[in-house]
Image: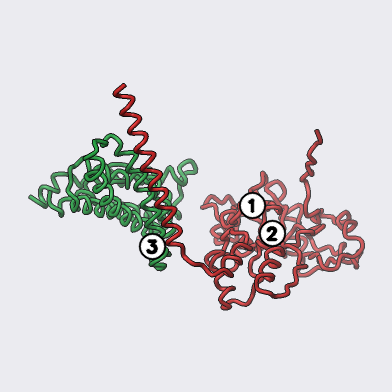
Chain colours: A green, B red
Amino acid sequence: MSYFAILITYIFISNLILSQFLGLCPFIGVSKNVESAVGMGFAVTFVMSIASLVTWALYHFILLPLGLTYLQTIVFILTIASLVQLVEMVVQKYSPVLYKALGIYLPLITTNCAVMGIALININSGYNVLESFTAGIAAGMGFLLAIVLMSAIRVQMETEKVPRFLKGAPIAFISGGLMAMAFMAFDKALLNNLVG
Amino acid sequence: MDQLLRIFWGFLSTVLFGGLLGLGLAVASRKLKVEKDETVEAIEGAFPGLNCGSCGYAGCSGYAEAIADGSDEDITKCKPGGAPCLEQIGKILGIEVDTDAVRMVARVHCIGGSDVASRSFNYSGISDCTAATVLFNGDKDCKYGCLGMGSCISVCPVNAITKTANGLVEVDQDLCISCGKCVDICPTAVMRMIPEDADLIVACNSRDKGKITKANCKVGCIACRICEKKFPDAGYKIEDNLSFLRYDNRGEGRAEAADKCPAKCIIPNKSEKIEETPSAG
């Protein structure tokens, strides 16, 4: 699979949120305004790309040779959680500017299922290290795209008259569902047309 | 047996791996510790840590930094912290501070609920006082009262404000941190700050003439001047067709004036609530 195809796949076709329904917690929780949605989106992209690299290395250099692949889920959780903590510390130490932009979002995604999901997808699809990294970035961009679109919708919805029983999370989930249906337009056929 | 051993090794290696990662993080947190200014940390520790923003900074840490580096010389901006916080900051910075000030709390100066105040139309727009005010200054006939849509509820950082059964709002004065956000957002300015130890309040905000007020609301202040004239020492003063009560000079006859009020809109500050005493044993 070419890198371009991987990019298109994880941004549009298998968008983690809108077609795999992973990471819905930050998708609903942090999408109340556009600014924080962008911050969250970039934080997720950042973590996903690093987590993809690290989990790939962990799987291929430790778990596979030792025959411990059945432990991959729990080990990945441990690794990703500590990795995010470590990254947070490093960023705080060496780049206060970046820390101010991403800092508050990093702890929120230590054990996010979307991050975990892309790590497992990488392994199951048999990607090499660069392909994994690309998939991580693309999945993060897909997340960014979805959450920014969602936040724009929710900002608009603030001024609309929503029936009381649908206020807040329910209407957000319904809008998310409609967005997911719209994203069904991106499918494998599109990829075949683009990449040939 | 083979299976058990397999589970055991899986368990052991995961524990070891997790422990190793934990150890690594512990070491990293030591090595990568960001040296913070001690004064900033001390000042930040003195704040309640609510991040309410009533000081004008993004959060408690922002204000602490501003105080510590001298760019902000006013150390009294933290309203939620109140006197104890001020005292602590004074100690840290070595400044003498006057901490006698009484804590201020927000109070709705209106008891004209849906049961006693008349309405001019049925409002069914979004539940927001400012939006309701745009439309003929709200749905109540009285244009000064509490609209009860709860704009104050949504800005209150500590959820101290609740709606009452008769379409008004109510501030829990024990929870109130005196940030004043509700006062700022209230379009009718019916929410005002009063001292925490206030005995009585004039629970009306109507500047209309007595006759109009009476037609709009059964419990509105009609500016009859009984409280002002009969009890000149009590601290009541009629201005703009509304009685105002002073709290700095509390003379004779305050409670009596409340009894004499024909509209019965002078009420105890902390009414209704029966103090619950924990029963022994």
Q: Quadrant of residue B10?
A: top left
In this image, B58 relative to B6: left or right? right
Whether residue B276 is situated above or below residue A7 in the rendered picture: above
Q: Residues within 10 Å of mark 1 (few under 14, many from 20)?
A: many
Q: Residues within 10 Å of mark 3 (few under 14, many from 20)?
A: some
**Residue plotted at (24% across, 53% down):** A138
Type of amino acid under label 3:
Val
In this image, B70 relative to A171: left or right? right
Q: Which residue is mark 1?
A: B161
Q: Quadrant of residue A43?
A: bottom left
Whether label 2 touches label 1, CB < 8 Å: yes
The answer to whether residue A93 is visible is: yes
A145 and B71: which one is in front?
A: B71
**Residue plotted at (78% across, 62% down):** B210
Pointer 2 chain: B
Distance from label 2 to label 1 (Cα)?
9 Å
Pointer 1 chain: B
Q: Are callouts 1 and 3 both on one chain?
A: no
Pointer 3 chain: A
Mark 1 element type? strand
Q: Position of residue B57 (x, y in %)?
A: 55, 68
The answer to whether residue A184 is visible is: no
Q: Residues within 10 Å of mark 2 (few under 14, many from 20)?
A: many
Mark 3 element type? helix
Whether residue B167 is situated above or below residue B129 in the rendered picture: above
Q: Which residue is mark 3?
A: A91
Whether residue B171 is situated above or below residue B274 in the rendered picture: below
Q: Which residue is mark 2?
A: B106
A86 and A12: which one is in front?
A: A86
